[in-house]
Image (spheres, helix red, strand yellow):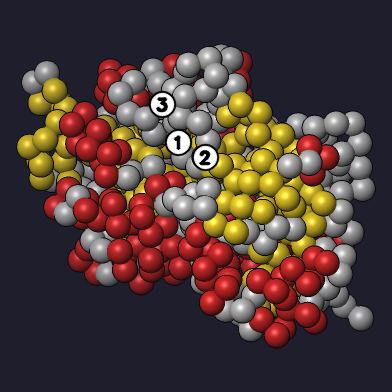
Amino acid sequence: MAQKIGIIDYGLSNLLSIYRAMKHVGAETTVVSDPSEIENLDKVVLPGVGAFPDGMKLLKQRGMIEPLRLHAAQGKPFLGICLGMQMMLGTGFEMEETQGLNLIPGKVIPLPAIDSSGVASRIPHVGWEFIREPRPGAWYNTPLAGNAGHQPYYFVHSYFAMPDNPDHVWAEADFGTLSFAAAVRNGVIFGTQFHPEKSGEQGLELLHQFVQQ
Amino acid sequence: MALKRIIARLDIKQERLIKGMHLEGWRFLQDPPQKFCAEYYRQGVDEIIYVDVVASLYGREKLTEIVKQTTDHVFVPITAGGGVRSLDDATDLLRSGADKVAVCTGAIKEPQLITEISRRYGAQCCVVSIQAKKNGNQWDAYYDIGRENSGRSVLDWALEAVALGAGEILLTSIDREGTRKGFDLDLIEQISSRVQVPVIASGGLGTPGHAAQAFQAGADAVAVAYALHYGLCSVGDIKEYCRNAGIPLR
């Protein structure tokens, strides 16, 4: 039986872009706005563009927090993208302190406007960046297996995730002198700060791997 | 440090791709804009900008349709603008698949629009498009496709736009636009050295070397129209030249 992949619609994301990218890599996906449908899904994609408190408020209003947490607790694959990834962390500090889904313990904090060498950086951080494997083997058998750091991905963000456990950092990138988590992972729970659906063929490859694995 | 970007800029009239000079004398190109975009994506373009030059007259249905069709096969960021006067206009474009919205005239007439878009969708979504024309020693910010002078200097307006929440500046030199004579490097230098958001240089690329000059002057991205549409060079040619000049690109 074909796997069921759902893109979570909570009113704050670029659904169309994700949907089309998933379709392009051959995945049958449905857009899910009814929380009761989440339990029937094999894999979840949680997109998001916007502010952390707004995102969590909308997930809560729509009764999606518990079904999403349950999905992850059952060991089913999960992919958060951008704000969707940030909300996987424990606590967000955008505008106000907000509880996240806590699939990956840690926090989401602002990118520094001035880096450790005193150089001012432009925020939001927009553009293409190379990513690194944080430790040997971190990408083995994961959707990033095909990359090996040879291609950049597209980032658009003002905040970044800081997992409590460094082993949950799946990929790193630089912002000035800061090395930050470009992607996070806890088992089959994946999250990317960058936008695979906007990162050309390299991004599509990541989605393809997520669908296949 | 984000990699420098090569952006294809497509000016649109109704459903057709057009190209002018000094934001005037528009000519139609044969193929539909989506087809040009697909080719630029294949060549490795980093981003697409659509500007509907008649949206304020005819509405945005044509542009939203073009954006929708483009996102079907182009998986890089898309900015769309033209006639955006309200938050609802911006919402329409974002819903059709655009990642960012460019505002020009609407922002000059009602600067709060920048703040509204930025608050609702994030600063990264809000590109303020500035049409610059040199008068004497300074550049003035124009609007209405380069027809009206706002009476403000480009630098003042750029600084205010950023303070209001602009996440990026699309800086078009009317003097160079469509001329293939190279970018207005002094303009790029003045603006990019003073604003804390990425600056996209637009207007004047005729050879790959012009892109390298713009990056060296401080541009974070260059927008290319004529040279790509008429096949003077490819995205790959521009990237190869810039890489050889030591500029980090995708």
* Residue A108 falls left or right of residue B221: right
In the rendered image, residue B246, in percent from the top left (x then y), is placed at 58, 15
- Circle 1: is it few (<14), some (14-19), or many (20+) Cα within 10 Å? many
C-beta proximity under 8 Å, tags 1 and 3 = no
Chain letter for mark 2:
A
C-beta proximity under 8 Å, tags 1 and 2 = yes
The C terminus of chain A - image quarter: bottom right
> N-terminal of the two: label 1 or label 2?
2
* Residue A183 falls left or right of residue B102: right
Give the CA distance from mark 1 to mark 2: 10 Å
Residue type (three-letter) at the residue carrying disc 3: Ala
Which residue carries the number 2 mark? Answer: A110
In the rendered image, residue A202, in percent from the top left (x then y), is placed at 72, 45
Above-or-below relation of B70 to B243: below
Comparing labels 1 and 3, the label whose residue is closer to the camera: 1
Which residue carries the number 3 mark? Answer: B219
Comparing labels 3 and 2, the label whose residue is closer to the camera: 2
Above-or-below relation of A181 to A197: above
- Circle 3: is it few (<14), some (14-19), or many (20+) Cα within 10 Å? many
Tell me if residue B45 can be seen. Answer: no
Q: Secondary structure at mark 1?
A: loop
In the rendered image, residue A96, in percent from the top left (x then y), is placed at 47, 53
Which residue carries the number 1 mark? Answer: A123
Q: Are marks 1 and 2 on the same chain?
A: yes
Please tell me which residue is depicted at 82% across the width and 51% down the height of the picture: A186
Q: Quadrant of residue B142?
A: top left
Residue type (three-letter) at the residue carrying disc 2: Pro
Nearer-the-camera pick, A79 or A105: A105
Please tell me which residue is depicted at 53% across the width and 63% down the height of the picture: A55
Please tell me which residue is depicted at 47% across the width and 24% down the height of the picture: A114
- Circle 2: is it few (<14), some (14-19), or many (20+) Cα within 10 Å? some
